[in-house]
Image: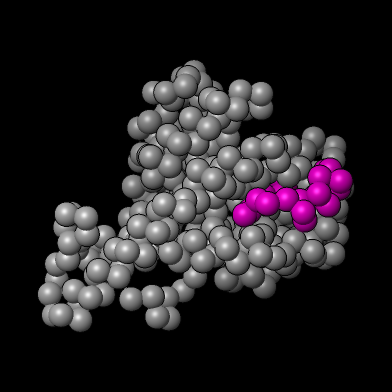
Amino acid sequence: MMDNKPAIRPRRSVLYMPASNMRAMDKARSLAADCIVFDLEDAVDPDAKQQAREQLLEALAQGGYGERELIVRVNALGTPWGVDDLVAVAQSGAHSVCLPKVESVAYVRRVADKLAEHGAPDMGIWVMAETPAGIQNIDEIAAAHDQIDVILMGTSDLAKELRVPHTPERTGFLYSLSRCIIAARANGLDAIDGVYLDLEDTTAYEAICQQGRELGFDGKSLIHPKQIDCANAVFGPSSVEIAHSRRVLEVWQKAEAAGTALAVLDGKLVEILHAEEAERVLLLADSVARMSAL
C-alpha cells in the first residue's frame, strides 16, 4: 500500500526559540527537535523587536538547520511590527509562519494575501488557538485556507482567558483541546499540544505528554531543550508499534491478494482502517529515522 505515498513530516517536538537570542538560535542547529519556532512575539521585548527580526534573518540565511522544520511566530498584524514581520518572513527561507491568537477566517486570509504579495504564496501557516473566540471559531479557521498546516495550542494564554488552572488532569482545557483536534483532523491538519511550564517535574511532564498523545495530538510544543527527548519518545512510534504495524500490513496484503477485505492477526480482526493506520505509523517511522540519521 505504501508505494508512492508522500512522507509524513514529524512534528513530535516543537521548540520555541526567542529570535532575540542569537546563541539559542545557533544551538538549535544541533538539537533533536523536529520543529523550531523562532519567536518574534511573546519572547521578545518591544524595544528588541526590530533587532530580533534582523538576527532571525541572519540565522536563517546562514542555514545549517538540516531537515528541521523552521517556523517563525510573528507579531499580530495590528501591532507596530506585524506587517514588517510578515514581509521579512516571506523571503526568509522559513517553511511556515505561526500566527498568534487567531480568531477569524478573515485574519488568516489577510495573512495569506500578504505572504503572496511578497513572494511566498505557498508558505505554510500555523494557527494558534489560544483565546475563547479562537476556540469557538476553530472549525471555520481550520478550513480558511489551503496553506494552513497545523493548529498549535496556546494553553498559557488560554488558561488566562478561560480562568482555568493548570492541573495534572487539565480538566478545564479538555473541551478546547479536543475541539481543536477534531477541527484539525476534519481538514487534514496536524495538531500540536501546548507547552508545559515546570521544567523540574519530569514525571508530570511525561504524563502530560502521554495525555496529549492519547487525546490525539501529533506533538508537543516546548520551552526548553531538556523537554525534547521525552516528546520525541512519546509522540514517535515505538519499536513495538512499528513491529505490529508491519505485521498488520503483511496480513492485510495477503488478504488483498486473496481477494478478501478481512484478515486476522493474533485472533483480532484486521480491516482496511487498521491497514491505513499501520501505513501511517510506518511512514512516520521512516521520516523519523531519516531525520535521526542526519
| Image position of 194 with respect to 98: above or below | above
User: Who is closer to the viewer here, 201 or 54?
Assistant: 201
| Image position of 203 with respect to 232: above or below | above
112 relative to 75 in the view: left or right:
left
80 relative to 71 in the view: left or right:
right
114 relative to 282 in the view: left or right:
right
User: Who is closer to the viewer here, 256 or 226?
Assistant: 256
228 relative to 237 in the view: left or right:
right
Instruction: Identify which residue is drawn at 63% across, 63% down.
Output: 291
Q: Quadrant of residue 259?
A: bottom left
Q: Quadrant of the N terminus?
A: bottom left
Q: Quadrant of the C terminus?
A: bottom right
Percent coordinates x, y for residue 131 in the rendering = 49, 34
User: Who is closer to the viewer here, 275 or 125?
Assistant: 275
Q: Quadrant of residue 117?
A: bottom right
Percent coordinates x, y for residue 207 in the rendering = 48, 30
> Which region shows up in magenta?
20-40
Percent coordinates x, y for residue 170 in the rendering = 43, 25
